[in-house]
Each structure stands twice: as structure tokens, then as C-alpha cells.
Image: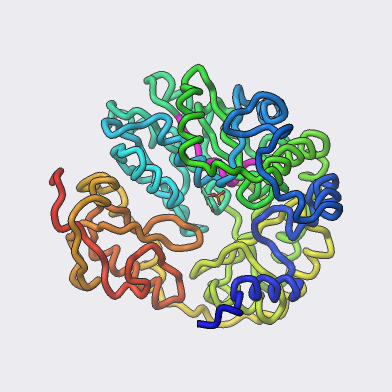
Amino acid sequence: MDQARAPYFDALQHYLQQKNLTFHVPGHQHGKSLPLELATLLREFGAACDITEVLGMDDIHNPHCQVQEAQELAAQAFGASRTQFLVGGSTVGNQAMFLANLGPEDLVLLPPNCHRSVYSALLLCGARAQPFLTDFDEVLLTFRPPTPAQVKKALESYPQARAVFLTTPTYHGLCAEVEEIVALNRSRGVLTLVDEAWGAHLAFHSELPISAVAAGADMVCQSTHKLLPGLTQTAMLHYDPRSICSQRVEQVLRSLQTSSPSSLLVASLDCARRMMVLRGEELLSEVLRLARRAREVLSESAGINCLVPETSHDPTRLILDTLRHGYIGHSLAESLRYRHSVQVEMSEVHQVLLLVTLGHSSQDLEWLLEALRKFPAREPPLNKRDLAQICHWEHFAEVPRCTVREAFFSEKRTVNLENAVDQTSAELLYCYPPGVPVVIPGQRLSQQTIDYIKAQKRLGGSIQGGADADLRTIRVVSQHKNDR
Ligand SMILES: Cc1ncc(COP(=O)(O)O)c(C=O)c1O
């Protein structure tokens, strides 16, 4: 191999030189909405900003001065009793929420739209997960978060549950009625743990759905880098020490996070909080205006329309209905990127998702709309059978045959995907993005799951997580302790 090469560096340099217009994370969009003082610091000191805890600089693992104050300010700003800064994204936030509250004897109720980090959290803590089905959104073709009635039913079926886990907003921006769900859980002594990776901005504008922190959830993680102007990997964990043991949270975070947290990331959390408290309402009003205007313009033209969910949602997403316009979402996303220099957040077979954030201007939205006008309407590229195969996953609510941890440590064998029906998956397979599972370790592989995987492959979707990247084969459990 040629050791003079640095392929990743070269690709990054090339990408930056292309000057793409981005509608994806991080929310600061190539630094455009980075807090001014942070941008100035970076310009002035460059790579010298890249330090970790040194004498005079506080440490997130042992906060006693600047980090302590910054976290207290953040707690007040987000309406939390206690806040911890994270440098490993909501991925580490989800892992910490599980490990701080659940052990191998515990049961947690899980709706179907959880991020893959939740399954690594289950592997770490060993808890048993009971999936329960929620409504399928026929507009976006994705699961909605659970309704209070669905949570109530799940709690009645599994009264031994220690916690209910929610993802709200979902990747597609769908929001749960968190206040009611918290009240239900609390009346039964059940914890409400919330992945609010996509909701760090909610607390700062009155037109946005209520944040899970304000709704009283026991513990909430938020990615500051997604929809607020934090640097990539920044996130926060908010919790109520009346129901969550703070010493355990601190111990867990010391175990999960790097012992050399980047000072730049920590400073960026501090600045993002300050910016939102001082100017959040004004900045988000502009984001909402831009997103609303883009939707209006698209609906008035004969071009690609936006899908608008009928239930509570975050309106800062633009979700393009590509299929009705005649395009598979993945191919439209590729054309936008390679022919029009527009990088979207995510594509699926039937739609494309773009984020409008603090880093966007009217000119950016004009550029996007101009690019979208270049796609003439065509015949829909899918038949009903294809569409049906990528829609429904009723198998998700099946009781897993063993825990994620049992599946991980079990003896395994490799079988052809075609022959895997009724086997127990040892793998976590997920569409990426959005990172939501198709099958989890410990779950039965149904014919429907296998058809789903094949349909996604045929339609250009990316299913990841398996040992065989082409998914001709799959690893299954050959023996596990808890055959249920
Ligand atoms: C719902 C959800 N939760 C958690 C995560 C992980 O967040 P992070 O990238 O901050 O680790 C993601 C990432 O996309 C996500 O979509």
C-alpha cells in the first residue's frame, strides 16, 4: 500500500472545495451559524484550540469551576434540574440513560423507531426490551411515536416495566404527547427516558412542540450539533436527580466517554447555549419562516411537493415527496448532490429529508428551490407491491427470543438470507440513515423481514450492521440460554 496517501483527508479537502449547499447536520452548516465568538476563536487560534483538560481548564469528568457553571447555566436554559455535557453525541446519551437506570433484571418498553445506539445501550446494560407497536404514518411511511393510549396499554400488559423509552421528535420530526405519557408513567412509578436528539431547539421557540424536559421526563438527551449550532459530537444529558441517581450518571459517563474531552467541543456547548438564550426566539422565527415559505412555493408550483404530517411535528424539516413526482428518493438525492451541489440530510426510497437550520438564509432556500425546479414530473417508478414491502414491519412487536446481550454472547452461525426464516438474528440490521432497525439481535427473522431487506437492496437503500455487507448471508443465534 502507498503510505504517502491520506485518502480520507483528500476526500475531505475535495468535499470542502466543492462548496456544496448543505441541508444536513451539523446545524451550523459549515460554520455559517457558529456563535460569532467561537468562529473568531477558531480563526485566531486555529488548531491551538484543540486542547483537553489542563491546569486552569475544568474537566467534564470532574467539574468544579467553569464546566460546573456552564452546565448549571445550560440546565437553567433548557429547564432541567441537572445537565451534563456530552462529547459523544446522543449515542453516548442513550447509552448513559440505559446504563444509569437499567440492569439485566429490568424490562424497558420500546417503540419501533429507536436509533441503533439504543440497541448498543441494551447490550451494555443487559436489560430486556419489550417492543410495542405504534401507528404507522401513512403520509411519511414511518412509525409515529407512541400515543398515551398505546403507552397505557403497554404498561398494562407489562406492569413490571421499569422504564418507557421514547424517541421524540423522530428523525422525520414527529412528536409524542410527552406530558401525558410522563403522567401515566409517573403514576405507576415507571421512568420516562427520552431520546430528543432531534429536539435541542424546541425549548427556544413558542411555536415548536414542547420539549421533553419541559414536559417533565426523567432523563433526556439532545444532540446540540444537530439542530443547534454545536460542533459535531456535542450533546447534552438533562435529568431530574429526584428520580435519577446523579452519582450513577457521573460514573457511567466517566466509563463511556473519552478521558480526553475536547475543550473546543465543551466551549461550543457553552456558546451554543448562550446564543440560544440570547437570540434563540429571533433566530428560530427566521428558520420557521424559511421552511414555511419553501413549502408554500413548492406546493404552488407543479414540481416536487412537501409531505406534511397530520400529527404534532417539528416544521423545520422539509420532506420531499419524490415518489409521487416520479423519483426514487436516493437517486434524486444523488442528482441534487452531484448535479446541483445540494447535500440533503437523508434519502429514503420514497422521500428526501432536508433540515432547515439556523445556518440558512433566504438565498440558500432560493438555490434549493431553483435546483428542485430542474426535476420534471415522471411516472412513479414503483409498483404497489414494492411500496408495500418497504412499509410494514408488524413483526417488530414480536417478543424477542432473547436479550440483545444474550444474542451478542451466544454461539452463532452464518446462513443464507433466503434460509434464515424463523432463525433468531444475532445481528442488528438497520437502514442508514435513519439508523432505525430492521431487525434486532434476539429477534425472529420473519419472511416479511427478509422480503423487506431484499426490497430495500433492490431499490438502492443501504442496510448496514451485518457481518456480510452485501447481506447475502446473516449471522444467527445457534444456541442461547433463554429459549422462550
Ligand atoms: C433519533 C436519534 N437518536 C440518536 C442519534 C445519535 O445521535 P448522535 O449523532 O448525536 O450521536 C441519532 C442520530 O442520527 C438519531 O437520529
Percent across and percent down for residue 366 are 80, 67
Residue 159 image-quadrant placement: top left
Q: Is residue 48 left or right of residue 194?
A: right
Quadrant including the C terminus: top left
In this view, 383 is above or below 366: below
Magenta-span inclusion, residue 331: no
Percent across and percent down for residue 426 are 26, 57
In this view, 153 is above or below 34: above
Q: Is residue 295 left or right of residue 36?
A: left
Magenta-span inclusion, residue 197: yes
Percent across and percent down for residue 118 are 42, 45
The number of discs equals 0
Q: Decide if residue 338 is in sight here.
A: yes
Instruction: Compare residues 422 and 329 and report the one nearer the observer.
Output: 422
The residue positioned 61% from the left and 74% from the top of the image is: 6
The residue positioned 69% from the left and 53% from the top of the image is: 27
The residue positioned 41% from the left and 70% from the top of the image is: 387
Q: Is residue 153 left or right of residue 19?
A: left
What is the span of residues highlighted in magenta in the rendered image? 192-200
Q: Decide if residue 311 is in sight here.
A: no
**Picture colour scheme:** rainbow
In this view, 13 is above or below 441: below
Instruction: Compare residues 258 and 97 and report the one nearer the observer.
Output: 258
Q: Is residue 248 left or right of residue 397?
A: right
The residue positioned 75% from the left and 74% from the top of the image is: 17
Instruction: Compare residues 449 and 269 and report the one nearer the observer.
Output: 269
